[in-house]
Amino acid sequence: MLEPSLIIEMVALGLVAGFLAGLLGIGGGMLIGPVLTAIMSARGIGTDLAVKMSIATSMATIVFTSISSVRAHHQRGAVRWDIVKRLAPGIVLGAALASVGVFSVLKGTALALFFAAFVTFSATQMFLDKKPKPGRDMPGSAGQMAWGGGIGFLSGLVGAGGGFISVPFMVAHAVPAINAVATSAALGFPIALANTVGFIISGQSAADLPTASAGYVWLPALAVIAGASVLTAPLGARTAHRLPVAKLKKIFALLLYGLAAYMAYKGLRS
């Protein structure tokens, strides 16, 4: 049974992550990963395992939180399902390579450093509010499958939904921003599902796993965080229409810098 203090910490994490996801249109993976790493490390779980389980559990929450987001975008007719169908096969292959292959081989400390570098890049893009200029049309089926592979692979290594890659990619290829965001939300489900299955498979032989773990996915944390985040995501979405989101993104970017620094510290220290 989870101790009350642990439940409170994870509920708070889920509530904040869900609200930010709804407010800023950003998945909670970049927040959940570092915070859950700190929670697990404080309870005696080694850095290597804590980082891996945090990334895997963070990704697993997206399986649930993406469903409501996809439904909302689909009802508004904003999802480009033709793009989803072309990117999804590559995403599944890239996710499998990351979660079953590379993820199981790399040390958690190396993953922490990669996570820190990726989050720093993403935070900088957010802080500067860089938007790619629409250019050429989307590549053909083979090109989109290749891009999908890259999106699925990188997402699997950092436990995020891939929006920081897929949205700029689509906008740069003449997809309107609103459709790019909606389509990215739809892509979050196959990204999360494929990687989560891979994390469960690759973690079967891992040593010292906490009780109630499915491979690298810590089920109690998944249940509490996902359940809490689903509650606050709609509130965040409604709040987004009343607050200066552009300024809030800069503030959140500063928070991401801090989280990236923490993960870099964990990686270098170990």
Image (cartoon, helix red, strand yellow):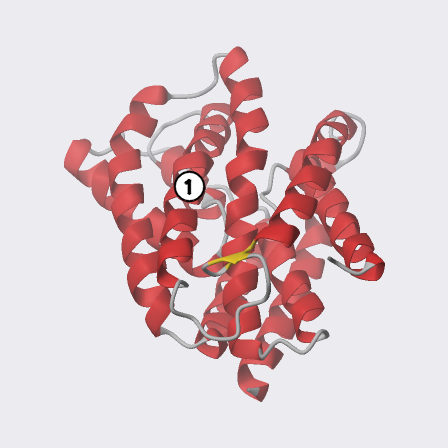
Residue 242 placement, left or right of 152: right
Quadrant showing the C terminus:
bottom right
Q: Which residue is the site of mark 1?
A: 193
Q: Nearer the viewer, residue 51 or 117?
A: 51
Please tell me which residue lies in front, 101 or 76. 101
Is 181 rendered above or below residue 111?
A: above
Name which residue lies at 44% across and 25% down.
Answer: 176
Q: Residue furthest front?
A: 1
Q: Is residue 13 above or below residue 240?
A: below
At which x and y percent is residue 115? 50, 66
Say if residue 168 shows up in the picture.
no
Task: Please rate how many residues cluster around mark 1, counting C-alpha atoms within 10 Å: few if below 14, some from 14 to 19, many from 20.
Answer: some
> Could you tell whether 253 is left or right of 139 in the image?
right
- Is residue 149 positioned above or below 208 on the image? above
Instruction: Report which quarter residue 156 is drawn in.
Output: bottom left
Up-down: is 58 above or below 211? Answer: above
Residue at point 70%, 60% (across, down): 254
